[in-house]
Every structure is written in C-alpha cells, then in structure tokens.
Image (cartoon, rainbow, N blue to C red):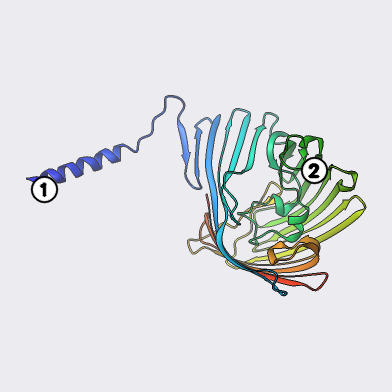
Amino acid sequence: MKKKYLCFVLAASGASMAQAGTVTTEGSDLVINTKSGLEVKKADDSAGFKLGGRIQWDYDATQTDDGAVDTQDFDVRRARLYTAGYYGDWSYKTQFNVAESDGADGGTVEDLYIRYNGFGSRATVTVGKQKEPFGLEELTSSKDISALERSAMTERYAPGRNAGLQLSGKGRNWTYGVGYFEADGDGPDDINNAAITGRATFAPINGNDRVLHVGAGFSSRDADTSQDETDLYNVELAGVVGPFHAQTEYFDSDEGSVSSDGYYIQLGWIITGESRPYKGGKFKRVKPASNAGAWEVIARYEDGDGKYSDVGLSSTDGEQTTFGVNYYANNNVRLGISYMDGEDVNNNGGDELRGRVQYAF
C-alpha cells in the first residue's frame, strides 16, 4: 500500500510541475528569449530587459629574457554581469565586474548609462559611464576579439570607458559617435579635465561574407598641466572575404612636445568556413555553422610605441607578434590559446603563453 501511495504522490507531483511551467501576466503578453542569456519583452515591443554576462578563466605564463618577470597564473580574467533594458524611447545598461584578475576586488562598474532613442537610430544620446568612441579593437567586445588580448597599441592609446555625454548614430553601412567625457578618472573634480572624442566609420561593402570597413577617430584630452594635454588620432581598415578576415589600425599621439605612434596588422582564417560577423562599425565573435563548432587561426604583428605589459615589458617603443587558435564550441562557449612574443627598443624580450575558457551569455 505504501508503494502504491508513493507512486500516486510522484505522479501527482509530476503533473503539478508540468502545469507550473505556465507564465501569466496582468498586463501585455510577454515574449521570452533564452537563446543567449535571458531576454523578456512585451509582445508589442514597448518595453523589455535582458540579463547576461561573461566568464573568462585563463592560464597565463609570462617571462622576460632578463628574468625580471617569470610568473604563472590560473585566474579569472573577466567575470561580469549586466542588465540592459528599455521602456518607450529610453534605455539603460548596467554592467559590473563580479571578479577580476590580479586579485582585484569585484563590484567595480564597467558600464552605467541611460540612453535616449527618440530620434531614431541616426541620433541617440547616451549619458553615463560608457566606452569613448575610439578604436576598432577597443570597441569590439573582449568576448568577441579574435586574439585573446588586445594589441599593445590599443592598450596604450585607446581611452576606454569614462563618464560623459555622447551623440551617436548609425545607418546600413555607416556609424558615427562624438562625446564629451571626463579625462582623468572618477574623482570629485574630473570634468575640469575633459576630453572630446569622436569616431566615424563607413563600410562600402557590407554583406554576410564580404565586408570592407574604413574608420577614423580622434580624442583631445585636457590634463592638470599643458605638458600633459594629449591629442590622439586613429585610422582603421578591415575586411572580410568568406572565411578570411583582416584588420589594421594606426595610432598617433601628441602629448605636449612628445609624439608617439604605432600600428598593428591582424589576419585570421576560420578553417571551418564561417565568416566573421560585422555590425554597427565593429566585429562580433564567430558563430558556428554546425554542432561540430568552428575553428579559427589568427596572427598579429605590431610595431611602435605601445604598452607591452602582456609580455612583461613596459610602455615603450617595441614590436610584438601574436599567434592564436580559437575553437567556438557553440554560440556561448569559446576555447582559445595564444602565444605572444615581444621585444623593446633596447633588445629586451618577453613572451606570454595564454589559454582561455570563455562562457558568454
């Protein structure tokens, strides 16, 4: 009798759980998308929100020829959570670090902004902490760049994220952005040291497997003294032809009476035949065409004044070569390995071997 009663309870519980999958609302019907992260929106598309994030676990071995740096580490490179949403003509995004490499505490802000979309896609206004519009590699998300780490040139010249006000827009094959930002961090008086930054791109060829991209950017940055005032310039060229992709950027900086410059050239081949996606003036990560996943090999060469900290060197004049292999298991999971070798103007050398497991949602 006990066994029969237990079977009845289990059957009833199963039926109850099946019925518990129903979702009802007091307002408009909802559309729920779980392909990547969690996205919920009203059926009439008047409001919605999305939850997502990324986790990157890295093994990193770095050493210099003179023995000044000789380290191995297995740590979280990035762990972030974000929520983004919209209601009518207004939208927002908040993104925070859950954990960071090198023992840094989590909880720091990456993105924190409000955007007005009432003028349409050709003119949006964004207020808050955001990426300044400068540099193709910098504006391509860290979960989507082909090399595991950005180039020494991008690391040195691209401003990254700062609080400010930006006007931006896009069409089928062009984008622009120009903004007024804090130039020196998050202190109580930073707006007195401001930056004006802008970027424009044009893609005369913009198809599913054929892309030609050109772009240019600038940033004029105040500082505490006239000697520290900086003007930055950047030009971009990139293309996709079937499974092959390439990009290059040149950077120039005038800081007081000191000038510096540098460039990188990056080539990639998706062995399994997919094309690298391109949208809105930047690239996205590879999407596998089959359940077997997608394989990609990349190579990058850079030369000039850069920040060569990945190979244990300082910000200096030098050169660096990177080779990498990526396996995209599906739209969310990526495995990668890269080797970087650099040398500065004084013939000091260093290298890095890095492996990564990434889950982005």
Q: Quadrant of residue 180?
A: top right
Disc number for residue 3:
1
Q: In the rendered view, tell whether residue 331 sits above or below residue 322.
A: above
3D distance between C-alphas at marks 1 and 2: 73 Å
Secondary structure at numbered mark 2: strand
Q: Residue at x 58, y 49 (%)?
A: 105
Residue type, mark 2 in image: Gly
Disc number for residue 324:
none
Give the farthest residue toward the right. 257
Which one is nearer the viewer's eye here, 309 or 301?
A: 309
Across and down, in percent, residue 157 comes to 78, 53
Across and down, in percent, residue 244 comes to 67, 64
One can see residue 297 in this view: yes
Across and down, in percent, residue 357 comes to 53, 61
Residue type, mark 1 in image: Lys
Q: Is residue 330 left or right of residue 138?
A: left
Residue occupied by mark 2:
198
Q: Residue at x 63, y 38 (%)?
A: 112
Which one is nearer the viewer's eye here, 349 or 164?
A: 349
